[in-house]
Image (tube, rainbow, N blue to C red):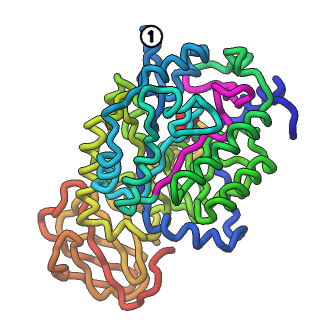
Amino acid sequence: MNAPITRTLLIAMALTTFSATPAQTDQHQDPQREERLAWWQEAKFGMFIHWGLYALPAGEWKGQSYSGIGEWIMYKARIPLAEYEQLATQFNPVKFDAEAWAQLAQDAGMKYLVITSKHHDGFAMFGSQTDAFNIVDATPFKRDPMKELAAACAKRNIKFGFYYSQAQDWHAPGGAIWQGPHEDAPAWENPRWDVRQEGDFDTYFNEKAIPQVRELLSNYGPVAIIWFDTPLNVVNVERAARLVKVVRELQPNCLINGRLGGENQSDYDSEGDNAIPDLSRAGAWETPATLNDTWGFKKNDHHWKKPEDLTFKLVDIVSKGGNYLLNVGPDGEGVIPLPGCDMLRVVGRWLKVNGEAIYGAGRSPFGGEFGVFSKSKTDRHGKPLFEARRTWRCTTKPGKLYLHLFTWPTGKFELTGVKGAVTTAYLLADPQRTPLQVTQTGEKVSITLPEKAPDTIASVVAVEFQNQESQEK
Ligand code: JFZ
């Protein structure tokens, strides 16, 4: 389809919300897919990084503060391209330290890292021969932080990946622009706010997006994930297939996330931002999430989540079968805000003790622990309201259950619906793995617990079975 993005198509875009319903991956489409996914399904926990020119305005423009996610400031303030380009001349993040960033990911227990190589603003955070609007050619910094970060991750066996905005590009002629509404910004009659944005989408796609994806997959060593975003319907099956072809040709093992566009060509599904399904979900899926309320740095967003909340979300997601991709937004000097670093290190310390129950773990065989649908209350769609419970979660490995107790019971933990004969149970925090007292009657198991929980956030009881088969439902 070579037609330019006409008004009708833009209006059509406006009617489509970002695909909050992830592209359903055809589980049996590609025999190599399971092989490609193996490391990712073991890894469970990754670092997302949103870093770009938007870290300089940091949520404010010409004295006005803008609500919502910081990386959309160009869109929200409808900044003319010539003014936005000036940010590049001021971008000199001399405090950027790839080793420190990769070490933070390692300290947090994160096994992969995905960083914005080009977000919707069109600015390339890598040395691109395709477009001079990039960090090497257009800034006083002149270094390629993607090269430095890829090397620092490789030293620590952290898988390295790129986020790339394949459809939206607010700087390139013909780049797609979300018609809106977006957060509190209304839908625009004409989403383009600068005449320089006029152009044909295929020209942008063929002359910028495809060549830059080729650069990313050719110049930075092994790329474990290419994380596409907001396909906006313009990335149809044909265009998506062209991107898949480039990825498979240059880096056959590289995973493609669920926001490519063009159904059934991704390797795994991406949930909506900060969206965690109420119940367990089969297949390979990931929740991308923020530490505060923005992806890109905002100087006034101090709404940090708590480490205990982050740990619960990690366990909750893994117990439902997913991966957790948790974001940091470095500032304009290249520094990751300290509150975020501190919280990630708390999660990392918890994983040092309890990682066995997360890395490579499967979904809960139960389900009642997630919560119940209300018999009387309805949600905003008129459906029965899901009332979540946070007392405990369960992850699994062959012949094992891991009971993550967020609320420490008095005396005993009772469990029903248990399949198989329990042989022993112990606290993961106990290096001696001293057997706890267990009684079992058929599918009912009762475990006597010490008075004090070994961990203030969550304590994990491992339960082993005679039968080494998977305990996953
Ligand atoms: C997109 C970007 O627009 C945003 O800036 C950030 O990079 C985020 C990770 O991804 O925002 C989205 C995309 C999809 C959904 C929601 C927000 N969705 O499917 O609900």
- Main secondary-structure element of the magenta-colored stretch: loop
Which residue: 57% across, 65% down?
282
Q: Position of residue 31 (x, y in %)?
A: 68, 74
Residue 81 seen from this side: yes
Q: Position of residue 409 (x, y in %)?
A: 22, 63
Q: Is residue 296 left or right of residue 384?
A: left
Quadrant containing the N terminus is top right
Q: Is residue 170 left or right of residue 458?
A: right
Quarter occupied by residue 428 = bottom left
Q: How many marks overall?
A: 1
Q: Position of residue 59 (x, y in %)?
A: 43, 21
Which residue: 55% across, 55% down?
225
Q: Position of residue 455 (x, y in %)?
A: 19, 59
Q: Nearer the viewer, residue 459 or 369?
A: 459
Q: Which residues are magenta?
A: 160-184
Q: Is residue 19 above or below residue 279?
A: above
View quadrant of ligand 1: top right
Residue kind at label 1, given as amino acid type: Gln
Q: Which residue is mark 1?
A: 64
Q: Is residue 388 left or right of residue 413?
A: right
